[in-house]
């Protein structure tokens, strides 16, 4: 029979070593790089269309980043980025695009309606619902406060 101290020592020896620092570094580096690309898209938008406002610039940037995330997912590159970057690839808006496109590609064989359209929001659906409900709640609270 093995005692608790020997068992703890055995577990420590056999457990894989944590790569937390390396993982955090790449998440920060790649996530930051994705955000820099978004900033560059916004700057290029202002150069091409000087009269664009802040709201329109943000909308164009969001659309371009969603397109890039979807494109990279479709050609199989975004998953490779995600393996290295971890959460650094999930947090930006490109990660949202990836979470929509991946299930759509996976269930494409089942057809457009029963496959792509019904399974596209498997991952992102709960997030969208939570966001909509939270925004309704915050809007109601703001409306109630504004009455007083």
Image: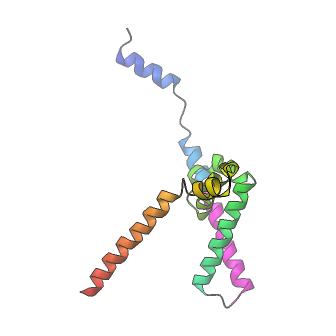
Q: Position of residue 64 (x, y in %)?
A: 68, 71
Query: Residue 135 versus residue 16: which sits nearer the camera?
Result: 135
In the rendered image, the residue lying farthest to the bottom is 51
In the rendered image, the residue lying farthest to the top is 1
Count all numbered tags in the image, as a single digit.
Answer: 0
Q: Is residue 15 left or right of residue 102?
A: left
Q: In which quadrant of the rendered view does residue 7 lie? A: top left
Residue 124, placed above or below residue 135: above
Please report the residue visible at 56 percent of the width from the left and 52 percent of the height from the top.
87
The N terminus: image quadrant: top left
Please report the residue visible at 71 percent of the width from the left and 87 percent of the height from the top.
49
Query: Residue 120 versus residue 77: which sits nearer the camera?
Result: 120
Which stretch appears magenta? 28-50
Please report the residue visible at 69 percent of the width from the left and 83 percent of the height from the top.
46
Residue 41 magenta-highlighted:
yes
Residue 49, placed above or below residue 82: below
In the rendered image, the residue lying farthest to the left is 148
Q: Position of residue 21 (x, y in %)?
A: 55, 45
Please report the residue visible at 65 percent of the width from the left and 87 percent of the height from the top.
52
The C terminus: image quadrant: bottom left
Q: In which quadrant of the rendered view does residue 135 lie? A: bottom left
């Amino acid at each position: 029979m093995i005692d608790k101290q020997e068992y703890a020592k055995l577990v420590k020896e056999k457990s894989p070593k944590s790569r937390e620092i390396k993982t955090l570094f790449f998440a920060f580096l790649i996530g930051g790089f994705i955000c820099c690309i978004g900033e560059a898209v916004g700057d290029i938008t202002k150069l091409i269309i000087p009269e664009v406002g802040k709201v329109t610039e943000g909308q164009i940037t969001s659309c371009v980043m969603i397109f890039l995330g979807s494109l990279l997912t479709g050609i199989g590159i975004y998953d490779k980025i995600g393996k290295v970057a971890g959460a650094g690839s999930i947090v930006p808006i490109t990660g949202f695009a990836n979470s929509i496109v991946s299930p759509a590609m996976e269930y494409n064989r089942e057809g457009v309606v029963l496959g792509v359209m019904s399974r596209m929001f498997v991952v992102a659906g709960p997030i969208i619902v939570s966001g909509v409900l939270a925004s309704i709640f915050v809007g109601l609270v703001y409306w109630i406060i504004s009455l007083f």
